Amino acid sequence: MDGVGMYGKVDPFPVTVPTDAAAYDALVTITFRYRTKGRGPFTLDLSAGTRADAHDLTTRPSVPWPLAPSTATDSSSVQFVVPALKAGKTYFFAPTADTGTPRGVGSSRLSTSGVVLTVQLTPRTT
């Protein structure tokens, strides 16, 4: 997953929600190594959707997670909550990286490796 003045993407990870409860909240953790080049800004976000090509679910935080610039390989973990997933449905999750570099500022690069995405489902109590 690389972002070079644009979005970097990996294939969406499908998760089918169990039917033991009416709805579940998902805690999505993304752990990865990364390095940067240029001024950035550098961000990591979660694409969460009802289809592999959709980003139509609410995530918290609702804005991309900022990453500190690092010319040496660094590591990080970020977490997102995706509330109220319906039982028995399949949802798709994927991390996305972005450099968000404004035009005319030069180029920036965000390279990642060792990306691990985990989804923990908790029955919704409300």
Image: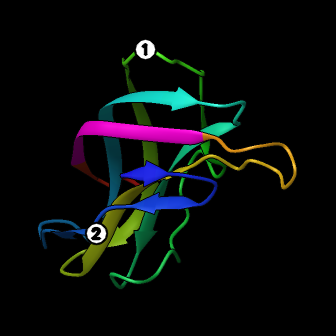
Query: Residue 101's x, y, as percent?
Result: 74, 47
Query: Would you place residue 70 above or below residue 19 in this image?
Result: above
Q: Nearer the viewer, residue 112 or 19?
A: 112
The mark that comes first in sequence, 1 or 2, is 2
Query: Would you place residue 69 above or below residue 113 in this image?
Result: above
- Per the image, label 2 sits on a secondary structure element best described as loop
| Disc number for residue 52 | none
Q: Is 79 part of what is drawn in magenta?
A: no
Q: Which residue is mark 1?
A: 72
Query: Image quadrant for the C terminus?
Result: bottom left
Measure the C-alpha gap from mark 1 to mark 2. 28 Å
Query: Would you place residue 7 above or below residue 2 in this image?
Result: below
Residue 70 in the figure: left or right of residue 78: right
Q: Amino acid at mark 2?
A: Pro
Q: Quadrant of residue 25?
A: bottom left
Which residue is depicted at the point 62% across and 37% down? 42
- Report the predominant secondary structure element of the magenta stretch: strand
Query: Residue 50's x, y, as percent?
Result: 38, 82
Label 2: how many Cα within 10 Å (few below 14, some 14–19, many 20+):
some
Residue occupying the far right of the picture:
104
Which range is magenta? 109-119
- Per the image, label 1 sits on a secondary structure element best described as loop
Query: Residue 26's x, y, as percent?
Result: 33, 53
Q: Which residue is mark 2?
A: 12
Q: Amino acid at mark 1?
A: Ala
Which residue is depicted at the point 30% across and 71% down? 92
Query: Residue 119's x, y, as percent?
Result: 23, 49
Q: Nearer the viewer, residue 9 or 102?
A: 102
Which residue is depicted at the point 50% across and 74% down? 55
Q: Quadrant of residue 9?
A: bottom left
